[in-house]
Image (cartoon, rainbow, N blue to C red):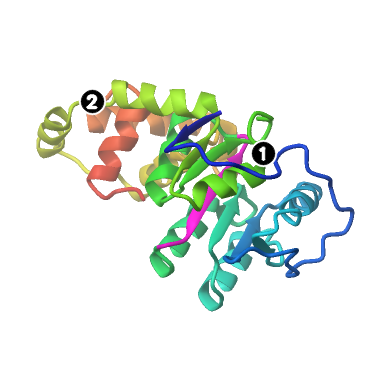
Amino acid sequence: MFAVGAAKPLRGGSGATFLPVPNWGRAQTLTSKTFQILLLEDERSVALRLGGIIQTWPSGVLLPPCHTVGEALEIIARQEVDILIADLQLPDGFGTQAIRALRSRQPDAVAIVMSVLNDSASVLDAIRAGATGYLEKDDSAIGIIKAMEMAVTQQSPMSASIARLIVQSLHEEPPQEDIGRRAAELPFTLTKRERDVLTTISRGFSNAEVAEMLGMSPQTVPVHTRNIYRKLQVSNKTEAIYLARREGWIP
C-alpha cells in the first residue's frame, strides 16, 4: 500500500465483517463528522460486499448504490456526496464521468477508484479527473475503510503497483517543450472517428472492446491507430493520448 501524507490511527479495514443485506442510508455509531458515501459499481455482488464493509465504518452513511453512470450523476446532481467510490468500466460509460461531475459540483468531495484496470492511461485519466485514490480490486493490502479515512484526511490511498505506475509514467512523459513544438507543427487534425477510437483506447479498452463499442471490425482499430500515430507524429499510445488531450481533441 502507498499513501501520500502522514499516518493516522485507523479503524476497520479488509477484515471487516460482511453484512448480508446492507441497510442503505443508516449510519452506525457516528462520530462528530458524518460522511455521505456513494458507491458506483455495476457488479451487484461486488456492490453488496463493499456496501457491507462500508456500513461498519461509524463515520459514514451509505447512500443507495449506483450501478450505472447515469444513476450516479442523478444522485450527485441532487444530493450531497462526501465520498465517491467508483469503478471505471460501467455499462453506460466511465466512472471518470461521475468523478468529474462530483468535483465540479462539490469541490471538497473525494473520489476513490476501485478497478481491475491498472494501465497507465486509465490510472492517469482517473487522477486527472479528480480521483484522490486508486485501488486495484484484488489488492488486499489496504481496506476500503482505511482508504476512506485516508482520503478524508487529505491523504491519497493507492495500491503500491498504481503508485509505481504513476511514477514511471511521469518519467516516461515527453518533455512539455517537445510536445508543444510537435503540436504546433501538426499539418492535420484527427477525424471524429479517430478521436472516438483514441478516446476509447485512453480508457484502457482492448482493440476488440473498442471495435465492439464503436461498431467496427476488430481489424479496423489498428488501422485507425496507425493513422493517429502518423498524424500526431508519435510512436506510442501514451504520447498520442497526451498530445490529443493537450490539443483538446479527446477528454
Camera-nearest label, 2 or 1: 1
Number of numbered markers: 2
Determine crowd level at label 2: few under 14, some 14-19, many 20+ residues with C-alpha closer than 10 A: some
Residue 129 seen anywhere in this rendered image of the structure: yes
Q: Quadrant of residue 101?
A: bottom left
The numbered dot on residue 143 is 1
The stretch in magenta equals 108-116
Q: Quadrant of residue 176?
A: top left
Can you say whether 56 is above or below 36 in the image?
Answer: above
Indicate the secondary structure of the residue bearing disc 1.
loop
Mark 1: which amino acid?
Answer: Gly
The numbered dot on residue 174 is 2
Residue at image location 28% in from the left, 26% down from the top: 173
Residue at image location 37% in from the left, 25% down from the top: 167
Q: Please name whichever residue, 218 or 151, is drawn nearer the observer in this view of the structure.
A: 151
Q: Please name whichever residue, 30 or 54, is drawn nearer the observer in this view of the structure.
A: 30
Residue at image location 64% in from the left, 56% down from the top: 40
Determine crowd level at label 1: few under 14, some 14-19, many 20+ residues with C-alpha closer than 10 A: many
Mark 2: which amino acid?
Answer: Pro
